[in-house]
Amino acid sequence: MDAQAGHEKTITSLLPALAGANLIYGMGMLELGVTFSYGQLVIDNEIASMVKRVVQGSPVDMETVGIDSIHKIGSGKNFLKEKHTLKYMPLEQSKVHLFDRRTRGSWEKKGGSDVRQRANEMAVEILREHKPMPLDPDVHQELKRVIERAESTTQV
């Protein structure tokens, strides 16, 4: 779980997704799948969320381009305070839960933890607190039937 792993996970998920793949393999895996890490799984989940956002794309039409703002403000000027920017920027920026986008000073004041530390802490919290939704009883019964059928046909 380091910068290299993050880069490799991003590039090996983004490129296939841009080519149309809808399955990301190896979530949580390290060392060619020899090692599994819950912290890496949390990081990979964040990467997958961002990849999905990129693949979704951004609408480009007369409203989203903001021609009126461009004419009003002019080329090379600051658009950050414009109503148009404030309306559309939150829709276009990926929402992160793990990665820290604060300035260095703010990050340091909050303890300066790196992504590996935060991912491991988040993984422990998820394992401790998460309460999965129970399977629908009909689905549970069907799974039991499938397993029983498979077990009865594989016995020697």
Image (spheres, grey):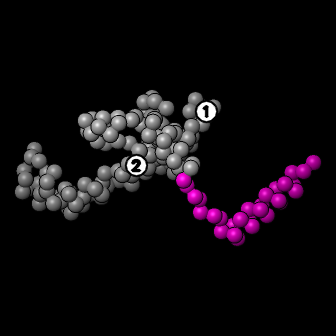
**Magenta run includes residue 140:** yes
The image quadrant of residue 10 is top left
Query: Is residue 59 visible in this depiction of the protein?
Result: yes
To which residue does mark 2 refer? 97
Please name the residue shown 43% across and 49% down the image.
49
90 displayed left or right of 38: left
SS type, badge 2: loop
Q: On residue 35, which mark appears?
A: 1
- State the image coordinates of residue 121 (x, y, percent, origin top left): 48, 41
Q: Which residues are magenta?
A: 129-156
Residue 136 x, y percent position in the rendering: 65, 68
Q: Is residue 63 left or right of residue 114?
A: left
| Mark 1 neighbour class, 10 Å CA radius: few under 14, some 14 to 19, many 20 or more | few
The residue sitting at 93% across, 48% down in the picture is 156
How far across and how far down the image is residue 29, in percent?
57, 37
Q: Nearer the viewer, residue 17 or 103?
A: 103
Q: Amino acid at mark 1?
A: Thr
Residue flagged by tag 2: what amino acid is it?
His
Of circles 2 and 1, the one toward us is: 2
Q: Main secondary structure of the magenta part?
A: helix
Residue at the bottom extreme, as displayed: 138
